[in-house]
Amino acid sequence: MPYTQEEGGRLNNFAAEPKMYVAEPPSKKEQRNYIIAGAAALALVSGVIFIAFSIS
């Protein structure tokens, strides 16, 4: 584990850093799946709000 030592003799421990990587943009299929999931989530939330207002 990497650490540094201060003037007073105290040690500062640092967490191990993960490897960095470049994120890739989503493919057309992934973009379509995100849109479908967003529409389904919007329909679910709208339905729950509609049911809540209709009950009260």
Image (cartoon, rainbow, N blue to C red):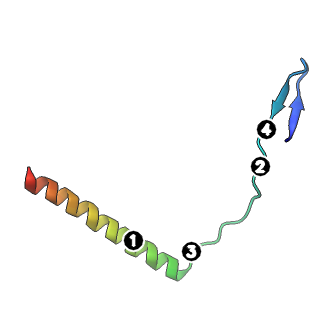
Image quarter where the N terminus lies is top right
- Residue at disc 4, secondary structure: loop
Residue on which disc 3 sits = 26
Residue on which disc 2 sits = 17
Dot 3 or dot 2: first in sequence order is 2
Quarter of the figure with residue 48: bottom left
| In this picture, residue 33 sits left or right of residue 5 | left
Residue contact at pointers 2 and 1, CB within 8 angstroms: no
Dot 2 or dot 1: first in sequence order is 2
Residue contact at pointers 1 and 3, CB within 8 angstroms: no
Quarter of the figure with residue 5: top right
What residue is at 8 percent from the left and 49 percent from the top? 56
Dot 1 or dot 3: first in sequence order is 3
What residue is at 30 percent from the left and 65 percent from the top? 42
Identified by mark 3, the residue type is: Pro
Dot 4 or dot 1: first in sequence order is 4
Please tell me the numbered disc located at residue 37: 1
Q: Tell which tag, 3 or 2, sits nearer the viewer.
A: 2
| In this picture, residue 51 sits left or right of residue 11 | left
Q: Tell which tag, 1 or 3, sits nearer the viewer.
A: 1
Q: Position of residue 49 (x, y in %)?
A: 20, 56
How would you rate the neighbour count of disc 4 (Cα within 10 Å): few for under 14, some for 14-19, many for 20 or more?
few
Residue on which disc 4 sits = 14
Dot 4 or dot 3: first in sequence order is 4
- Residue at disc 1, secondary structure: helix
Q: Tell which tag, 4 or 3, sits nearer the viewer.
A: 4
